[in-house]
Image: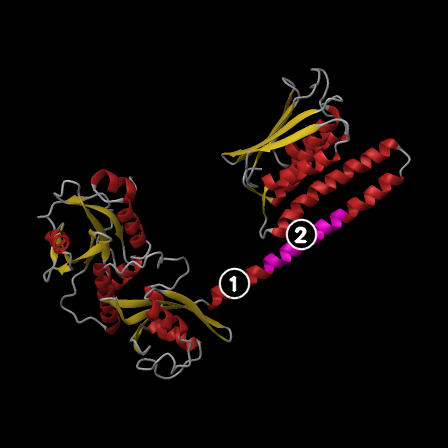
Amino acid sequence: MPTLEELAREKTDLRKEDVEHLHELLGSWQLLADLSFADLLLWCPLSDKEGFVCVAQMRPYTAQTLHPEDVFGTIVRPEEIPVIDRAFAEGKTWRRDDPVLIDGVPVRMEGVPLKGDLGTVAIITKEGAPLTNRRPGRLEQNYMECASALSRMVQEGRFPFRGKSLSAEGAPRVGDGLFRLDLDRRVLYASPNALSAYRRLGISGNIEGETLEGLGLDTTGVLDALALGRPIVNEIEVETTVVAQRVIPFIKDGIATGAMMLVRDVTELRHRERMLRRKEAVIQEIHHRVKNNLQTIASLLRVQARRSSSEETRGELEEAVRRIASIAVVHETLSRDPGEQVRFSEVARQIIKMVADGVSEPRAVAISFEGDPGELPAELATPLAVVLIELLQNAAQHAFDSQGGSVKVTASRKRGTLQLIVADDGKGFSSGSEPMSGLGLQIVRALVEDELAGSLVMSDETGTTVSLEVPVTRKAR
């Protein structure tokens, strides 16, 4: 299915600026659909001026959709839906008093011109069930009046608000609770959900007809929205209750005439966020302490190594220090970033620096890193860190003569599998001998094949290359 940009480029003469304006509308028009109890379809004129193409649609949360199938990409001629053609030609809202029959279904239809910098760029049709044979309730009537105010702003080019999306995640929606306010911040109407949210703030008695100041509430957000002519989001917290507010001003002929305020009780949501932040802080502190403890153990082993009279014992203790240090690197990364995911490229670069700093002169060993496997779970990153430091240390110690050489580490991720390649340009190994021996090779094989359920391949075509693949997910392992 083509995107809005592709459809506009193929079927219309819309400018880049006009398409950007349409995207701004798509970030806010859920509000208009919910208030109108109607599907919204966005129609742009064809390049040949012989009809219109639907470039977007929005279904309401407050009513059953009349378009269960997508209308996106549909082309209509002017005579098929005259409301669209007339609203575009005259640049003002047009509605049919009688329902329009679409596929045999009566539809309440209204065409609203969307104004851009150079005039009308599209028509929004509001298509809902006819309001016949019944009298709308107060909630429905107030929703529709708010929808009419927003439609007028669309026609005047004042909605959507430039750079202000009204569909932010977690923001109050129409069904969460709605207040209608006049210029004096007086409550003209409060939906049942809005009343419930304010009751939780401890406000008793009558709310409709009272000003927000009279209710003892902070009105800074409403004042700013009316003065600046743009939506404002804030929160009110009374003891343990938190209510989110989104104030949307109504503008007519450039002057604010009132506002609607969407409210939502977010007490439980904020409580969970605080609990999560506390847990993250505890986890980070644990990783920080584990890192410190590992570094302390490494320091003790270094002291023991310096005091040892045996060259072999000293070498084994130094290898143990490096293994512990590689694990500490993972915990250091986790102590800075919340969660149990580690960006392995950062860990790899710290390990590379650690190994490079430990290479004794006069040999010069250049170690480089390429690729970005993304974030890995700590349970995978920790053994991989140990594997990497073993492979790098082996290459630095045994792959080169006095002239030195280079080692290249490459990491990639594909289809749930991590691939790590450590390749050097050293002397390689003969076909009858292992490139690594002793405890180092045992550790690498045990971690890759047994613990991580991966595979390990060694070759010496040009130097020594060690390739390993391990599944990323615990389930795959």
Looking at the rendering, which quadrant does residue 366 occupy? top right
Q: Give the distance between the C-alpha atoms of the residues marked 1 and 2, in whole angstroms.
A: 22 Å
Which residue is depicted at the point 31% across and 53% down?
A: 24
Q: Residue visible at 32% across and 66% down?
A: 229
Q: Secondary structure at mark 1?
A: helix
Q: Is residue 366 rendered to the left or right of residue 314?
A: left
Q: Estimate how packed mark 1 is, as few (under 14), some (14 to 19) or many (20 or more) residues with alpha carbons within 10 Å.
A: few
Residue 106: x and y in percent read 13, 57
| Amino acid on which the number 1 mark rests in the picture | Arg
- The mark nearer the N terminus, 1 or 2, is 1
Residue 323 versus residue 435 in the image, above or below: below
Answer whether residue 123 is visible to the viewer in this image.
yes
* Label 2 crowd bin: few (<14), some (14–19), many (20+), radius 10 Å: many
Residue type indicated by callout 2: His
Q: Is residue 416 above or below residue 277?
A: above
- Judged by its main secondary structure, the magenta piece is helix
Q: Which mark is residue 53?
A: none
Secondary element at image label 2: helix
Q: Which residues are magenta?
A: 279-295
What is the tally of numbered marks visible in this picture?
Answer: 2
Residue at 23%, 38% in the rendered image: 10
The residue at the far right in this view is: 309
Mark 1 highlights which residue? 272
Q: Quadrant of the C terminus?
A: top right
Q: Is residue 101 magenta?
A: no
- The answer to whether the residue labelled 1 contacts the one labelled 2, judged by CB atoms less than 8 Å apart, is no
Q: Which is closer to the viewer, label 1 or label 2?
A: 2
- Residue with the mark numbered 2: 287
Position in image of residue 372 (x %, y %): 55, 37
Between 56 and 418, the residue placed more toward the observer is 56
Q: Does residue 364 appear left or right of residue 161 in this picture?
A: right
Q: Which residue corresponds to the image point at 86% horizontal and 42% vertical from the top-left? A: 304
